[in-house]
Amino acid sequence: MPLTDTAIRNLDPREKPFKISDSQGLFLLVNPNGSRLWRFKYRFNGREKLLALGKYPLVGLKLAREKRDEAKLLLIDGYDPSAERRKRRREEFLNEGISFSDLAAEYVEKLQREGRAGQTMRKLAWMISLAEPRLGDLEVKQIEAQDVLACLRVVESEGKFETATRLRSTIGSILRYGIATGRLTADPTAALKGALARPQKRHRSALVDKEAFGELLAKIDDYTGEPKTAIALQLLALVAPRPGELRLAAWDEFDLEERVWRVPADRTKMRRPHRVPLPRQAVERLRELERFRTKSGLLFPSTRNWRKAISENTLNLALRRLGYDREQMTAHGFRASFSTIANESGKWNPDAIERALGHVEGNDVRRAYARGEHWDERVEMAQWWADQLDQFRERAQG
């Protein structure tokens, strides 16, 4: 028997949810908390489905039946009412519009929730600032390839070809996030492939000649600046970490008895914890560094503010003081020196060298089978490398 308003008003909730049918698939779901919810049961492509029609009394009996009949008309025309509702909501969401600036802010918040590194977020903010003047106020669904290209041409005209290429990638990432969240339907940056001048690929400067590297090590030993900076350079050479990992290192990450440094996941580029075996020479440098230990717990606190680590430029500036310009050697270059010389020696498994550098296999299938850390080999390799550095230094000193 079809429902009446009087019957609905007189319904009392029970301990468990129950249904009261009206007609033609329409029923009222009554919950223990007293809420009354309209539902339409139908079949589409042989499958039973439910469509929510609203909450009583906001949606009365008459309106619920009208909504049911609208859904039935869609079924007659071969459309799934639930799918059509989702489609309509997507279209409404898309029609609301959102500016590039607002979408970029959402994208930044997403990456922050994922725990991206501070350096990564600062670079992203800089890239977005380059796009803002031309794209910031535009609705993302109205942005075309020509709009993006005009933005990139401004950067390119300054001779910053690599920056322009990275900016295209950043804008594309933001717009693809917009596609995923229903704000637009296509990525206009895809049409710009080949439109920009190709930047010359530049590798980070590094010394890979053993004799030249030995001369650098000897100069570091004679460094007349801040003693802690000299030790930082020595550790860069000995254990080949990323400069940011060493610069922000804390004492509680080191076990000098076990001779291991445990870099936490939130400071590694790959967002995975990384163990570093410490050779005898590295432990000696760390023991020496302990004389300068502060309450901050940092290995290398700033001389201006002991609560903060040394700046990103400290180590590179120290190399400049030693006579090496940016085309000859950088703080990051110690990693390339280690990788090149260790690989050329033929003594070590290339996978062990990659793991020592904190790299992760890019091939998903190969990574699934190469989960080991090669720890024992890396411990042996770390001591071999430190001993090699001693030999390079001694030859340079005559």
Image (cartoon, rainbow, N blue to C red):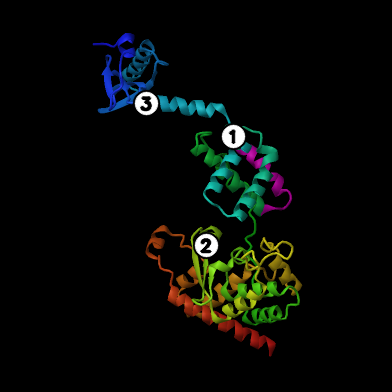
Determine crowd level at label 3: few under 14, some 14-19, many 20+ residues with C-alpha closer than 10 A.
Answer: some
Reply above or below: 272 against 172. below
Identify the residue at the far left of this view.
Answer: 1
Give the percent coordinates (x, y) of residue 35.
37, 22
Give the percent coordinates (x, y) of residue 159.
72, 53
Q: Nearer the viewer, residue 26 or 338?
A: 26
Under mark 1, the amino acid is: Val
The secondary structure that dominates the magenta segment is helix
Q: Which residue is mark 2?
A: 264
Q: Earlier in the sequence, mark 3 or mark 1?
A: 3
Secondary structure under tag 3 reads helix
**Which region of the structure is painted magenta?**
145-161
Reply above or below: 306 against 101. below
| Front label number (3 vs 1) | 3
**Relative to 343, is 290 on the left or the right?**
right
Residue drawn at point x = 67 percent, y = 42 percent: 151
Secondary structure under tag 1 reads helix
Disc number at residue 140? 1
